[in-house]
Image (spheres, rainbow, N blue to C red):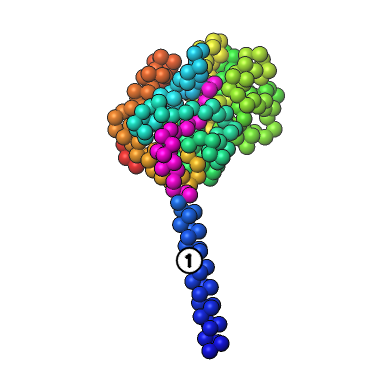
Amino acid sequence: MKKFFSILTMIFIGVFFVACGENTQAESTQKTDDSLSKIIERDKVIIGVFGDKPPFGYVDSNGVNQGFDIYIAKQVAKELLGDENKLEFVLVEAQNRVEFLKSNKVDIIFANFTKTKEREEVVDFALPYMKVALGVVSKNGDIKNVDELKDKTLIVNKGTTADFYFSEHYPDMNILKFDQNTEAFLALKDNRGEALAHDNLLLFAWANANPPYEVGITHLGNDDVIAPAVKKGNTELLNKLNEILVKLGKENFIHKAYDATLSEVYGTNITADSVVIENTSL
């Protein structure tokens, strides 16, 4: 009889731990998959954007967020909650975009975020909406290849694709790094560096507005894409965001965003079809 009760006790303990394990797994899944329901319950989506990267994301003289990323983000909020005003913009910098997602300071990043293998390991990217590569701008476009940067100073922003690219491929290069875009471009104008590397689309826009600077190196490294991102594991929100981007793609909305925010900046030098991506399927 004693042996019987010992066996019964062991079975009970085993069932108890299995049940606990299942509950823990269920709770974990619930925590992972409530990202969308939290936004709906809050009735507001929090989106991380740039405040100093025109024409993609910036704050105008009236303190209003403007730019290509902003235009799309507002429509995403409208599709998500029925009103584009049901969102809060949080200003981010290149090097803290991932951290703001991890720490739940924002729900989505719409901050000219280039999709890379390294970043895919720490965030979940939605469908892309823009094509991009690296470029290098200099006075009169004098720097036309990377070899000409030898013994010169190159300016980059911390945490950008340009920062990672040159740090990895040209570790001996003299690189001057800044937190903010405004600081980096001011340093170039102040002759603290001979050239500045960044996304080529940003450089084309900046150079057009700041002669005599020209983009001497128009394409460097990989052909990449820019996409919104969510916290790793926020599957509910990611799926919904992708659904919205497909809907917008079928409506040719990204072209509309380009016409409203970028066409005047680029003029005839760049066409919308060469820049934007319209997703029509998952």
Q: Secondary structure at mark 1?
A: helix
| Residue at far top of view | 211
Residue type at mark 1?
A: Ala
In magenta, the rendered stretch is 31-55
Q: Which residue is mark 1?
A: 19
Q: Answer with left or right where residue 93 lies relative to residue 30.
A: right
Residue 198 visible in the displayed image: yes
Q: Residue at x 56, y 16 (%)?
A: 141
Between 275 and 138, the one nearer to me in the picture = 275
Residue depicted at 64% across the width and 25% down the height: 178
Which residue is more in the foreground, 177 or 90? 90
Residue 270 percent coordinates (x, y)? 41, 20
User: Between residues 78 and 10, which one lies in front from this camera angle?
Assistant: 10
Question: Which class describes the residues within 10 Å of circle 1: few (<14), some (14-19), or many (20+)?
Answer: few
The answer, for residue 227, to whether it is visible in the render is no
Q: Quadrant of the C terminus?
A: top left
Residue 51 is situated, as x and y percent measured from the top left of the image, at 53, 22
Residue 85 in the image: x percent, y percent?
40, 26
Residue 233's place in the image compared with 252, above or below, is below
Q: Residue at x 56, y 87 (%)?
A: 2
Whether residue 48 is situated above or below residue 261 in the rendered picture = below
Position of 120 relative to 182 (above/below): below
**Magenta-colored stretch includes residue 184:** no
Labels in figure, total: 1
- Residue lying farthest left? 251
Is 246 left or right of 69, judged from the image as shown? left
**Point 47% across, 39% down: residue:** 230
Q: Position of residue 76 (x, y in %)?
A: 38, 31
Q: Per the image, is 48 magenta?
A: yes
Task: From the viewer's side, name the closer residue of 21 and 229.
Answer: 21
